[in-house]
Amino acid sequence: MASVPSSSSSSPSQPKTRKKPGQNSSPAPPPQTKWRTGTQERLYSRRLVDALRATRDRTQVQESVGSRAVKEAADSALALTARGQSRWSRAILFGRNSCRRKLLVKAGGKIRRHRRKQHGVPPVAAEPGVLKEQKVKERLRKLGRLVPGCRKLPAATLLEEAADYVAALELQVRTMRALADALSAATVSAPEEEETAAVDPMAIAEQGS
Amino acid sequence: MSSRRSHSRHSSASRITEEEINELVSKLQMMLPDAPIRRNSRVSARKVLQETCSYIRSLHQEVDDLSEKLSELLASTDTDSAEAAILRSLLMQ
């Protein structure tokens, strides 16, 4: 069987469309390339910023934005950027926003609200030989617990979701790190003025005592 | 190439072949940070899954650390410099 040269080469953009006449739908880009395009990064960073700003506006001056709120905002933004095309993103969005429908509208209505199992019953009898080992099943179960919303999936679907989730997580880490760096660069310059103002009364107080 | 496509079309997602599983496993393996180029030979699925689990867990940990850092930063900066920094980081993408 010839190997598919779509993502193993160093091309960062999406693979060329292979539209054969007998095809159902256009093949989805593999997760490594899909989550690494510049548009995805920009989309996600913008969504993250919006989510963070919304979170900060909601929490008043007294309490600071908790890290958990930041993480949830980041995860929701990530799931939004996935546009509801993967199961884990749908699981995140539906888990959080049972009362808030605005985010669904923001995604452009592209999230299908299918909660039932799609494409029939998962196969029980027709498992390939690799999956019948006990340890492999254990690892699969562990993986299912890590990826949100994927506990009961058949193996192939779970593997697909995991690949997509890993790529998305990498994007999340990269964006958050860039944002943190930018913010810390801003905080380095800003409080210097405050510190010079605060040092003077301190020095005077020490000299006085 | 075309044979694989028609094969999956016949099975219509109700029967998953071993080939597809192997393909997915190798795709996962390539995404792991541990030198995917070196492992041209097939690594056992068990190991790939184990490394994927630990990788996801470490990514989760990084996200947690970064969100804590971000929450501290957001609390300490005032609005204007935060907005400026955010815009700067967006423009640099």
Image (tube, helix red, strand yellow):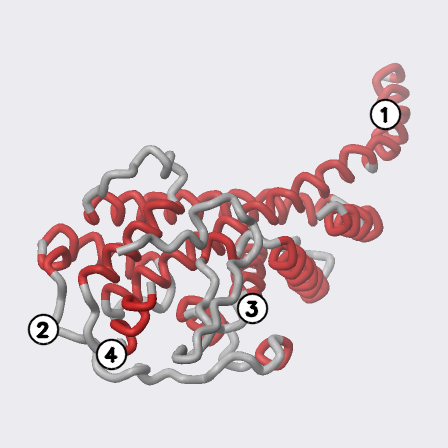
Expressed as whole percent of the image width and height from the top left, the position of residue A205 reads 86, 22
Q: Specify whether B7 is left or right of A49.
A: left
Q: Nearer the viewer, mark 2 or mark 1?
A: 2
Question: Label 2, on which residue?
Answer: A125
Question: Dot 2: within a 10 Å radius of its alpha carbon, few (fewer than 14), some, or many (20 or more) residues?
Answer: few
Question: Label 1, on which residue?
Answer: A199
Say what amino acid the circle numbered 2 marks: Ala
Question: Label 4, on which residue?
Answer: B10
The numbered mark, 1 or 3, whose residue comes first in the sequence reads 3
Separation of residues labelled 1 and 4 (CA atoms): 76 Å
Asked if both marks, 1 and 3, belong to the same chain, the answer given is: yes
Q: Does residue A102 appear in the picture of this structure? A: no
Q: Would you identify the image quadrant in which residue A194 lies?
A: top right
Q: Are marks 3 and 2 in contact (CB under 8 Å)?
A: no
Mark 2, chain letter? A
Number of numbered discs present?
4
Separation of residues labelled 4 and 3 (CA atoms): 33 Å
Question: Label 3, on which residue?
Answer: A80
Say what amino acid the circle numbered 3 marks: Leu
Mark 1, chain letter? A
Asked if both marks, 2 and 1, belong to the same chain, the answer given is: yes
Q: Nearer the viewer, mark 1 or mark 4?
A: 4
Q: Nearer the viewer, mark 1 or mark 3?
A: 3
Residue at x-position 82% and y-position 34%? A189
Asked if both marks, 1 and 4, belong to the same chain, the answer given is: no
Residue at x-position 60% and y-position 48%? A176
